[in-house]
Amino acid sequence: MKRQTAAAIAALIVLAACDREINTVSRPLLGTIVNLTAVCDRETAARATQKAFDEIARIEALMSPYREGSDISQIARAHGPVRVSPETFALISQSVGISRLTGGAFDISFASIAHLWNYKDPGFVPPADSALDRARGLVDYRKIILDEKALTVRLAPGMKIGLGGIAKGYAVKRAVEVLMAEGVDSGIAEEGGDLQVFGSKNGGPWITGLMDPREKNLVLSIKLGHLDSVATSGDYERYAEYEGKRYGHIINPLTGRPAEGMVSVSVFSKDPVISDAYATAFFVMGVRKTAEFLKRNPDLGLSVILIDSGMKMYASASLKEKITFLEKWPVVEWIDRR
């Protein structure tokens, strides 16, 4: 349900010489590479990034479906309510709320069907319609039963959930909070296409770039201010082909099949958790429904750059003054969220 790399959004961390050092450290976590950048002295950077990595590892231990003792693994094995950590409960509850808002376009119970799509298999064959039809009944966020007082989660028999569409955003958010608490006042946390910046680049904005999802060349740059975040979903990193057709890894929870019509969706906001979840939701919803959603929900503070399967770009008018095109794009349509 989630992208893996930052092929569509690339951080352009090009800083002029300054009194403070630029320290970037990378580690494999959450099934991707985590990059932390701290603009400060080396001693502060070493301490702060270590604590941020420890925090991300803690979140992975809580929320990874591949960790034996994680909350998500325990929920999957249980036949009744499972008490989970307050963090996991809050993120599941937030996920269900986003599912309601998006009409199920974002749904963490996609995990009930995702295992049928084995993109890593060299002999990939799409699952049979009969198998998808059997599993599709388990994909329904309304069957996730939450007890806020007891902090328990209960699923229907055979149902599974996965936080791959929102947990990276949460880990980015917490990494930035840790870095700032440890005395770093400027930097970036980036995980598999999700990133948040804080502070400034020598008193000015940070700059990130959008790549052409097919040609992989940089097509535009965009300015980011303090605590701006961006997450990108695309069909270009994890996919399989069968009989000449491309099957992307982002599952439409409403059909149980790969979402169609989009090749790249980037969502900008002040909250990486929100950016992360809505990047997936909008990829499933497509351009028209996304534009309508943004007009109905201006208070969410979301801006987008969408590229459909015809390689037409749609971008929020709120980003217009922040974008610089590095090469001519065939068609751009500006979306007003009012």
Image (spheres, rainbow, N blue to C red):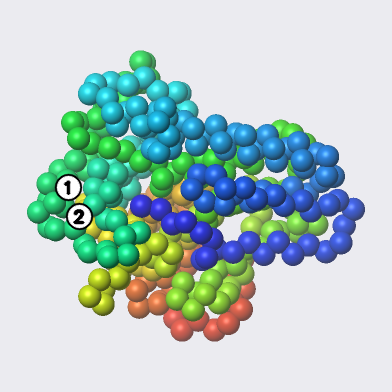
Amino acid carrying mark 1 in the image: Arg
Q: Quadrant of residue 209?
A: bottom right
List the residue tagged with mark 1.
136
Amino acid carrying mark 2 in the image: Thr
Residue 204, given in percent of the width and then of the height, sits at 75, 59
Q: Which residue is drawn at 35% across and 41% down?
A: 162
Q: Are marks 2 and 1 in contact (CB under 8 Å)?
A: yes
Mark seen at residue 327: none
Give the structural element (helix, strand or loop) at label 1.
helix
Pick whichever, 13 or 337, lies toward us.
Answer: 13
Residue 109 visible: yes
Q: Residue furthest right?
A: 19
Pick whichever, 87 or 317, lies toward us.
Answer: 87
Q: Residue at x 40, y 53 (%)?
A: 2
Left or right position of 266 against 206: left
Q: Residue at x 83, y 64 (%)?
A: 16
Pick whichever, 274 or 77, lies toward us.
Answer: 77
List the residue tagged with mark 2.
255
The C terminus - image quarter: bottom left
Residue 146 visible: no
Would you call the spot at circle 1 few (<14 residues within 10 Å), some (14-19), or many (20 or more)?
Answer: many
Q: What's the CA distance linking mark 2 and mark 1?
A: 7 Å
Left or right position of 64 against 159: right
Residue 234, given in percent of the width and then of the height, sits at 42, 63
Would you call the spot at circle 2 few (<14 residues within 10 Å), some (14-19), or many (20 or more)?
Answer: few
Residue 169, given in percent of the width and then of the height, sits at 51, 45
Specify which label sits upstream in the sequence, 2 or 1.
1
